[in-house]
Amino acid sequence: MGKRTLALVVYDPAAAQQRDAKRARPSAGAGVLVPYDAAMPADVEPINAVPLNAIAPRLWQAPPAPINREEPPCLRNHVLRELGLQEDLPVHFIHEKRVTDTDLDAHQNRFRIPSDGALRRLRPILTVDELDSANLLYDPASLPKQQPEPELENGDATADQEGKKKRKRRGKVHGGLPVKLVDLAAGASGELLLSRWSSSHGTIVKGGGYMDYVRRCSFKEHDVVEIWAFKQRAFRLLGTTIFDGSPLHVLIVKRDGKQHDCRNCLE
């Protein structure tokens, strides 16, 4: 094996100090602090940042129900219990109206809910899918207007009139959200449908069996009634169903109704 040669190095304090000074000096390629004014072009103004919550559109909130509205009699003890719903279920006041002859007319076969109550108080308690089913997802003002049918020439008009005599024109098919009407005397109806007409924008409850049910209700024509709505949402805990959901219920009760209108109080 060869021997390692040792070299004698003499320590020079002046040279060491000069070498340390070179290491501390920043190189040309290193990051250099540049004044802010020098980095900004002369014709560019600084950006004024605005918080997102200041420019985001506000979600519309429904006004609370009037504080002087008392819940219908027997609602907690009898109505909700008979329907198999939770007794502490939130119940929402929708609107007040006078029952008209069209609400009891067999040809109309529907109960109309005032538009103000449907838009301002009923819509906020429904989900997006439920609003879509009831045709309540969009405001009537934002919907495009239906284009009128083009006028026909004289010959075409005559042929069209003859065709109408041979076949009856079918009306537009409306869907709807499953709903049940509730009356203190008649109890709950079968499954009906809640929908808003595209033409008149009226919100109505309709369906087979409506007239048979409404004849058993406690309200009559010209009665002033309050309209309330409630819907139970399914609740699950750790994979176990605590209670099931329910369809939307619309309770119609006379404003001057007394407790003896409740059929459960008579038993």
Image (spheres, rainbow, N blue to C red):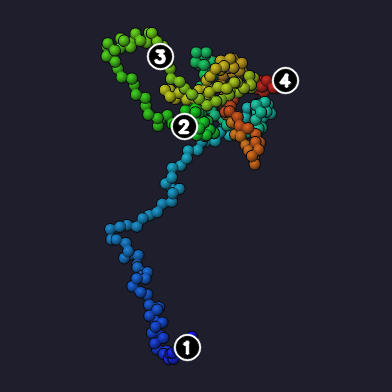
Which of discs 3 and 1 lies nearer the camera? The answer is 1
| Foreground pick, 10 / 183 | 10
Which residue bears the numbered disc 1?
3
Which of discs 3 and 4 lies nearer the camera? The answer is 3
Q: Which residue is drawn at 43% across and 42% down?
A: 57
* Placement of 10 over or under 94, stated as above or below: below
Amino acid type at mark 2:
Leu
Mark yes or no: residue 90 visible. Answer: no
Q: Which mark is residue 137?
A: 2
Q: Which residue lies furthest to the right in this view?
A: 267
Q: Which mark is residue 169?
A: 3
- SS at mark 4? loop
Which of discs 4 and 2 lies nearer the camera? The answer is 2
* Placement of 246 over or under 168, stated as above or below: below
Residue 216 on image: x %, y %:
61, 16
Mark yes or no: residue 55 visible. Answer: yes
CA separation in Å, label 2 and label 3: 28 Å
Q: Residue at x 38, y 8 (%)?
A: 166
Amino acid type at mark 3:
Arg
Q: Residue 267 carries which label?
A: 4
Query: Based on the displayed image, in which of its 4 quarters is residue 217 positioned?
Result: top right
Question: Label 4 crowding class (10 Å Cα cut-off): few <14, some 14-19, many 20+?
Answer: few
Residue 171 on image: x %, y %:
43, 17
Query: Based on the displayed image, in which of its 4 quarters is residue 144 positioned?
Result: top left
Earlier in the chain: of badge 3 and badge 1, it is 1
Residue 124 on image: x %, y %:
52, 34
